[in-house]
Image (spheres, helix red, strand yellow):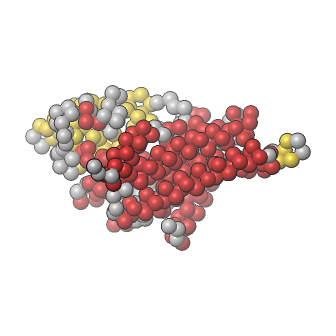
Amino acid sequence: MYNSKNDLVRLAAKEFAERHIRPYVMEWDEAQHFPIDLMHQLGQQGFLGVLVPEQYGGSGLGYQEYVSIIEEIAQVCGSIGLSVAAHNSLCTNHILQFGDEEQKQRYLPKLASGEWIGAWGLTEPNTGSDSARMTCVARREGDEYVLNGSKCWITHGKSGNIVVIMARTGEIGAKNNATAFIVERGNPGLKFGKKENKLGMRASETAEVILEDCRIPVSARLGEEGDGFKQAMKILDGGRISIAALSLGIAKGALAAAAKYAQERQQFGQAIVQFQGISFKLADMATKVHAAELMTRHAAVLKMEGTNMTKEAAMAKYYASEIAVEVSTDAVQIFGGYGYTKDFPVEKFYRDAKLCTIGEGTSEIQKIVITREFLKDYPL
């Protein structure tokens, strides 16, 4: 599960986060500033093409190293961890997994280097988890497709240089009715709408993407027509490992802050960690974090083996995201009144954690996936 390469990658991510992210965390959060220059730096360090083979300009690493990178960055700032995760596992990975050789050669080097920032568009205002009823449509006209519709909650929706869009190419509710397309920034039919004003993850840009008679060549299609939904589900399996790693990093950051504070804070002549109410709370927090890490690492092992890990990825994402909320809530409680102020980091972990239970499939959706997969082991 751990090796020297993973340890070196973890250390590199930790040092980068401490030097280039921690000094600006609250400044970016307060201003809702998405640091594009930082993304370019992350690319130069190899953190934006983690899973991309070296032949396409990537780092050529595996999911264990990827989990470590996301986790270390998220311990400092969940927002940047989210942006790194979305860039790697959604847009870049979709092209890596389902693009043809020409598409890989054209886009992966720019994405892996951080020269270009990637976005991925599936969700719509009225069809969040019901993607078979998307209203964003693609109509073929000769050697082109014409896309019309909108996508919401898109990470890097405004600043992305490239967006992988899922659009409906069949009837509403029909099987295999969606197709994936690559749309480049600068296309006159690609516009950007409202940037969301969020509770947490405020330095990670979330915006609406609008397509108005957006014409793209047939060569911009990813795979065959009708394969989009199947592709998206496979991408989300890996994406759930990303969100589990993100959740784990946030939980670890909150736990570390709470453990340090509990040993420093004096009440009634002793450190508050000496009180059973606090020490037991820390024990529960540490146990949950450990369990979440084991589940996340196990899903990553299965992913690298090529084993079906839909259930394990959903379990890891579900559990890690829920305990991130619980651990960050307990961290605020340990800090008391100070935890409710922006002078200490736990209030940001508390705000950031909640998105992990929503993004890339809510906890409720994860339960549906888990039950569906789990029952395959118990046929009637």
Is residue 189 something that shows in the picture?
Answer: no
Q: Horizontal placement of 99 versus 243: left or right?
A: left
Q: Horizontal placement of 182 versus 201: left or right?
A: left
Residue at 51% across / 44% down in the picture?
321
Residue at 18% across / 36% down in the picture?
174
Q: Residue most toward the front?
A: 380
Q: Give whichever of 115, 88 is nearer the camera.
A: 88
Q: Give whichever of 171, 95 is nearer the camera.
A: 171
Is residue 251 something that shows in the picture?
Answer: yes
Residue at 34% across / 62% down in the picture?
307
Q: Residue most toward the right?
A: 269
The percent position of residue 274, horizontal first and vertical second, equals 81, 49
The image shows residue 134, relative to residue 62, as above or below, that is above
The percent position of residue 41, horizontal first and vertical second, equals 50, 54
Q: Horizontal placement of 320 versus 92: left or right?
A: right
The image shows residue 260, relative to residue 357, as above or below, that is below
The percent position of residue 190, horizontal first and vertical second, equals 30, 35
The image shows residue 325, relative to residue 85, as above or below, that is above
Q: Residue most toward the bottom?
A: 4
Q: Give whichever of 61, 361 is nearer the camera.
A: 361
Q: Give whichever of 40, 318 is nearer the camera.
A: 318
The percent position of residue 359, horizontal first and vertical second, equals 44, 40
Q: How many marks?
A: 0
Residue at 74% across / 49% down in the picture?
279
Q: Residue most toward the left?
A: 142
